[in-house]
Amino acid sequence: MNKIFILFLFLSSFILKAQDTLIPVVFLDDVVISEENNGFTVNDFIGYVKMDTTFYQGFKHLRYYQHSYSSELNIYNRKNNKIGSLIRFGTHFSDFKNAWIVDDSIYFDGKIYKRNGDYKFYTLEAFDEVFFPKDTIRVSLEINKNENSDESQNMRDAKTIGFSIGTDNVKQSKGGAKKKLAIFDIDMQKYYDYIISDTLYNGIECYVFTVKVKDNLEKNQIEKALIRKVLSYFDKSNFNVIYREYQFIYSNWFINLDMDVVVHFDYINSIHVPTDILYKGFWKVLFFKKERTDFRLKLHDYIIE
């Protein structure tokens, strides 16, 4: 398994896949979703969730439009003491065909770099490749569902999982992972509660869709639910995802990982863009050192006309 594959799991996406099976039971909490009032049924709603492309499109906008960024990444040891940090400020430029970044300033402290200038940790490499590419990259607003032949299957799987909730379209199924990730599959529904509610988020009326592990599961059952929680806020007016939170845990003889990812969106001149991304995670791959990190990326001053 590619050691950076897991770190891309929730951080990059250029492939979206739809699913066929609709969940038969959904719990409603403080909200009534009816065809009469909203033009869709509960099963319609679940279909929207599973086939959503707005989360992916928001990240396409992130690369397509110029904006400023600030980020902080911290590295911790096994006692959870901070041993290094990397802070950067800069601008993501775009001419709507190509994009590139320019760091205005970089500050680091502690164990970040090797003597030759390379990073000491793979987490840093992964975040650089996703958010701070060294070279100019091509950008487009087109959603391309075709597979990129230059990418490994691991990378294609990572992108599919990261941006398609509950996908079962992962060709590799080591340790039953394919089935365990398909959180809407009939075989997985005994492990999860599915709850629809509503809320007001940044002044926007939203549906809230929560998928979480049941409270009464035995330990061996919990271990079968790799995705522990997915929380999504959908703008009621257009079904754009404007908040999403993932909790993901996986452990076997080869790898241990525990990750939380939170993404906030907003509208800039009616364009849907990410504004705040948070990651907190631990991972250990056999024969490699443990890495415990947290990362926050703030995105602002978008130029959208």
Image (cartoon, helix red, strand yellow):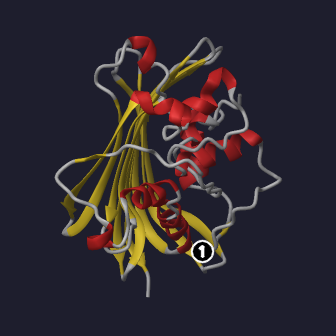
- Residue that appears at 53% across and 51% down: 163
Q: Is residue 297 left or right of residue 187?
A: left
Residue 256 in view (yes/no) = yes
Q: Nearer the viewer, residue 37 or 53?
A: 37
- Residue that appears at 66% across and 30% down: 3
- Residue that appears at 68% across and 60% down: 135
Label 1, residues with CA under 10 Å away: few <14, some 14-19, many ≥20:
some
Can you give x and y, in whole percent of width and height, for residue 59 in the image?
51, 62
Residue 17: which quarter of the image?
Answer: bottom right
Can you give x and y, in whole percent of width and height, for residue 57 in the image?
52, 66
Indicate whether 261 appears above or below 204: above
Residue 24: which quarter of the image?
Answer: top left
Q: For the N terminus, which image quadrant?
A: top right
Q: Secondary structure at mark 1?
A: loop
Q: Is residue 91 left or right of residue 234?
A: right
Indicate whether 282 appears above or below 85: above
Q: Amino acid at mark 1?
A: Leu
Q: Is residue 262 left or right of residue 29?
A: right
Q: Nearer the viewer, residue 186 or 236?
A: 186
Q: Name the residue beneath numbered marker 1.
A: 141
Indicate whether 291 appears above or below 269: above
Can you give x and y, in whole percent of width and height, for residue 239 in the image?
38, 67
Number of marks in picture: 1
Residue 74: which quarter of the image?
Answer: top left
Q: Nearer the viewer, residue 129 or 143?
A: 143
Q: For the C terminus, which image quadrant?
A: bottom left
